[in-house]
Image: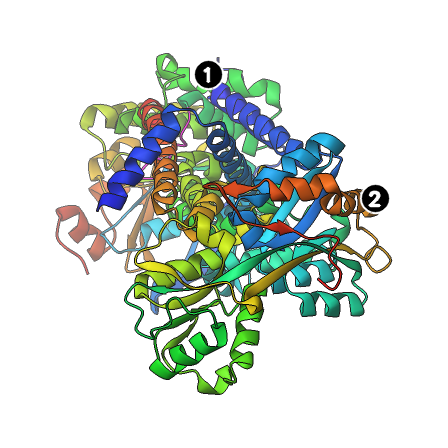
Amino acid sequence: MSTIAQAASEAVQLVVALDPELARIVLLSLRVSLTAVLVAAVIGLPLGALIAVARFPGRKALIILLNALMGLPPVVVGLLVYLMLSRAGPLGALGILFTPAAMVIAQAILITPIIAALSRQAIEDAWTEYQEQLRSLGVRPARAALTLLWDTRFSLLTTVLAGFGRAAAEVGAVMIVGGNIDGVTRVMTTAIALETSKGDLPLALGLGMVLVSIVLLLNAAAYLIKDTAQRRYG
Amino acid sequence: MDDAPVRAPISLLPLQLLQVAFDAGGRRIIDGVTLTLDAGPRTMIVGPNGAGKSVLLRLCHGLLQPTSGRVLWNAAHLSPHRSGQAMVFQRPVMLRRSALANIEYALAAAGVPRPEHEPRARDALARVGLAHLADRPARVLSGGEQQRVAIARAWALVPQVLFLDEPTSALDPTATREIEAAIGAIHAGGTKIVMVTHNLGQARRLGDEILFMHAGRIAECSRADAFFDRPATREAAAFLRGELLW
Amino acid sequence: MVNARRLLLAACAAALSSLALPTFAQDKFITVASTTSTEQSGLFKHILPIFEKKTGIQVRVVALGTGQALDLARRGDADVVFVHAKAAEEKFIAEGHGVKRIPVMYNDFVLIGPKSDPARIGGGKDVTAALKSIAAAQAPFVSRGDKSGTHMAELALWKAAGIEIDGAKGPWYRDTGQGMGPALNTAASMNGYILADRGTWLSFKNRGDLVILVEGDKRLFNQYGVILVNPARHAAVKKDLGQAFVDWIVSPEGQAAIESFKIGGEQLFFPNAGQSGA
């Protein structure tokens, strides 16, 4: 119990002191995960919408696969991306291993299935409500998918937040493809792992509290936006 | 604005159903329907619950494909043109945007040139008396207002045929009257009306011709006054008396 | 609603553009694959800024176990390796992945265990005798089991004690597959014995009931070497920048930097670049 109290005080001290290294780590964490979520949303939302609306052979199998991929272990994704980006691998010439770009790629791969699977569910639910009217208006499936994406935008915001939460929380992928390099690819989760392995548990836990607080704040902000917009647009 | 509505060059009507049958869930819901819908008269489809009225409407509009038989618009070589048809459903489906934007969306989907979207949409809203709600989010409007927007949306497309599936069954009498007035005006503009209703009074007010359905078949098809005063079939007579039919 | 869309697009553009920066910002940098002991002890945080200030070359350290570090370099993902397992390093060079092995510094291992010391090894000067006692008492022992330099040293010591550890190990021998820090955490939580490098031990904070029980045996000597990854074998290696680092760390200035690193007044690593046979 005292470790937790110690951790809480360490967390407060770090934040109040505006520790520059902490600030750098936090900013990098946000940048990597937010960018990854952006990429994953750009790919995953239309993908989920299309699968929700279109009918094609193998659709059920694809949905099952997508749902299963939500549970991709981060460390496995990290390993696969590492093998791709390693100098000995097919994309080694890009030279982006051990950079934030590699971390973004790994996290984007990790959360695209989450966004696609959850948006597919949300849009499929909306499709049952909208389908007859849209078809009556002569709207083709592709166009309908885009329309539904915009119409379900509030529940999709929650989906995107879920993706962000997963990205910000994972350590397995960014550790392997980023290398936890001090000052370059060290993010909140890898810093916590490092301090834990050094035995500095209060500091590790304190960093953990900072991370959770940040994610909480982001979620609160998103909820407020969603709430006001929802009341305006119905 | 009541200039002559812009129309598809070829008339879609008459619409012919030839021995159309429809099965679903192992049941035969439409059982060999043959009918012709001509331009002009407002057609009301009435009948007891489960008679297949809504399904028949959807078969006509093309939302459902017949299990057997054919649905033919004017001459066999025409594929059903969405741009000549529109449908209003029992519960209006509004997109999460303004009332005006909902109508503009339909116009865009129909391929209407962009500069025409706003004026035509505003005009349609004005015709149903909702010009003042143009920028209001459609989903916060009342049920009656939403249905009027739905009617306006269909009207803006200037369809040759307007299908309506119990459009007022969820509305109060005032709203119902407003919808009926709009339907009358649409018809006056030259659009064929095909409407399912369970409200006999409404059928009487609005109908020129009545299709009476029972157990998946057209049991009787006659002019409105003839149907209500002198129903030809036993089932129709029982129905008009308010007796349950199976 | 149009405003919301524009805001969203602007946010996306900003996020995307901010991503590009870290990747392309630094031109002059090298990737050094090293061990967890050198990073976690704080050595790199002490000496690297000196090098960076002098040469303008950023040193990016990927800290893994020795085995992993060498494997990383075998794939061409590092420019320099800096590890502590002479046999493995020489094999690395023999395979053609490295140019030359140069000794840099040494520290020592210490045998750590609970204050209660069930195997009665405390104060001893013979590490192999201590290991024999631990095995005989079947006292809990934590091994890193991760092909690290420390792990390889541990295995060599069991061999020197005449114990075939693969066959002899029972439930008392915990093969964790972890880095030094996590392994120490495990040892602290189960009051077990563990072989650790002095550097990590000195900066380790979660000691529980653990203390140093055996130290000073010559066989606990732990030599570090630096190797430039072979540019002939891996074309992307930054030959000149990497060589600059190698040259610096064995230079009088680099060696002095190593010597000046202390924790609580105690020196952790002892530079010995010129020592023959190291």
Tell me if residue A80 comes above or below residue C125 in the rendering.
above
Pick the front one: B14 or B51: B51
Q: Left or right of C140: which side holds A53?
A: right
Residue type indicated by callout 1:
Arg
The residue tagged 1 is B122
Q: Residue drawn at (21%, 41%), measured in percent from left and top?
A: B229
Q: Main secondary structure of the magenta part?
A: loop
Magenta residues (range): B89-97
Label 1: chain letter: B
Q: Is residue C35 visible?
A: yes
Where in the figure is residue B231, as x and y percent of width and height? 23, 48
Q: Residue drawn at (24%, 34%), measured in percent from left and top?
A: B202
Pick the front one: A70 or A57: A70
Q: Left or right of B115: which side holds B194?
A: left
Residue B210, by quadrant, is top left
Residue at the extreme bottom of the image, as rendered:
C167
Q: Left or right of B53: which side holds B242?
A: left
Where in the figure is residue B93, as x and y percent of width and height? 37, 36
Q: Residue drawn at (56%, 48%), measured in percent from left and top?
A: C39
Q: Is B94 a magenta residue?
A: yes
Q: Left or right of B148: which side holds A116?
A: right
Tell me if residue B234 comes above or below residue C47 in the rendering.
below
